[in-house]
Image (tube, rainbow, N blue to C red):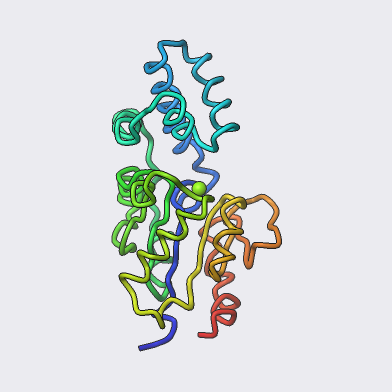
């Protein structure tokens, strides 16, 4: 077996597997989250937006704030916000499919959302079959990146599914720079997929996932394959 076939790719989903030009996808979900807050607290959309901003700042995510302040069940929250008739998914991308198919190794989605949102989006883009698994917020016991336990759980999953020798070449791709330091501390190679500046925890940076082929030769060299 070629060493490159042992690379494990951990892809964030939102704004990583679809680009910042497709931000309207996330906007459609954000709108639904605000509507959840609106219904739960019987406030208008404007007030619900303000509460969301407050929770985002204070707790990292709206869901965390809702859990702490109102005992919201994560599944109730996701059941409401993931109703497909309110959402927009990223468009079909033959180019993305070709890039992912030509990437050697195993590909896993590592997302702070619930798996059904990512899987619907991957199907819409025509790339669902490129991934072996979606490791989601539920698998992290509802506490997501950048909290250390999320990465520990991801690592334990990898240990139980792959041989120890195959865990030396792990590449982590995410659009949020705050998610990189913990990945780096695990010995994973980090790729920031964003237009924002890279930091000391970034091994490589890309503006879009579509630029992945351009860094592949350098990345392979760093991975010694
Ligand atoms: Mg993201």
Vertical placement of 168 versus 151: above or below? below
- In-front residue for pair 8/17: 8
Quarter residue 159 falls in: bottom left
Residue 223 locus on image (x, y percent): 54, 80
Q: How many marks do you count on the picture? A: 0
The residue under the point 45% across, 59% down is 11
- In-front residue for pair 140/200: 140
Residue found farthest to the bottom: 1
The residue under the point 54% across, 73% down is 216
Residue 29 locus on image (x, y percent): 42, 33
Quarter residue 77 falls in: top left
The residue under the point 60% across, 32% down is 57
Vertical placement of 148 versus 4: above or below? above
- The N terminus lies in quadrant: bottom left
Residue 158 locus on image (x, y percent): 37, 68
- In-front residue for pair 125/46: 46
The residue under the point 42% across, 56% down is 110
Vertical placement of 85 versus 17: above or below? above
Residue 7 locus on image (x, y percent): 44, 76
């Amino acid at each position: 077996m070629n060493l490159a076939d042992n690379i494990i790719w951990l892809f964030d989903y939102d704004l990583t597997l679809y680009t910042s030009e497709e931000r309207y996808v996330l906007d459609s979900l954000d709108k639904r989250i605000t509507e959840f807050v609106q219904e739960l607290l019987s406030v208008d959309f404007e007030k619900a937006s303000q509460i969301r901003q407050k929770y985002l700042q204070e707790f990292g995510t709206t869901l965390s704030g809702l859990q702490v302040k109102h005992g919201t069940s994560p599944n109730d929250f996701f059941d409401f916000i993931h109703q497909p008739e309110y959402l927009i998914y990223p468009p079909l991308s033959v180019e993305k499919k070709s890039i992912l198919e030509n990437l050697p190794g195993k590909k896993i989605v590592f997302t702070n959302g619930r798996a059904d949102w990512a899987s619907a989006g991957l199907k819409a883009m025509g790339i669902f079959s490129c991934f072996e698994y979606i490791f989601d917020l539920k698998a992290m016991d509802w506490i997501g990146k950048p909290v250390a336990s999320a990465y520990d759980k991801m690592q334990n999953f990898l240990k139980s599914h792959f041989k120890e020798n195959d865990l030396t070449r792990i590449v982590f791709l995410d659009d949020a720079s705050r998610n990189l330091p913990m990945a780096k501390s695990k010995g994973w190679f980090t790729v920031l997929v964003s237009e924002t500046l890279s930091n000391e925890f970034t091994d490589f940076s890309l503006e879009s996932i579509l630029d992945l082929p351009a860094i592949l030769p350098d990345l392979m060299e760093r991975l010694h394959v």
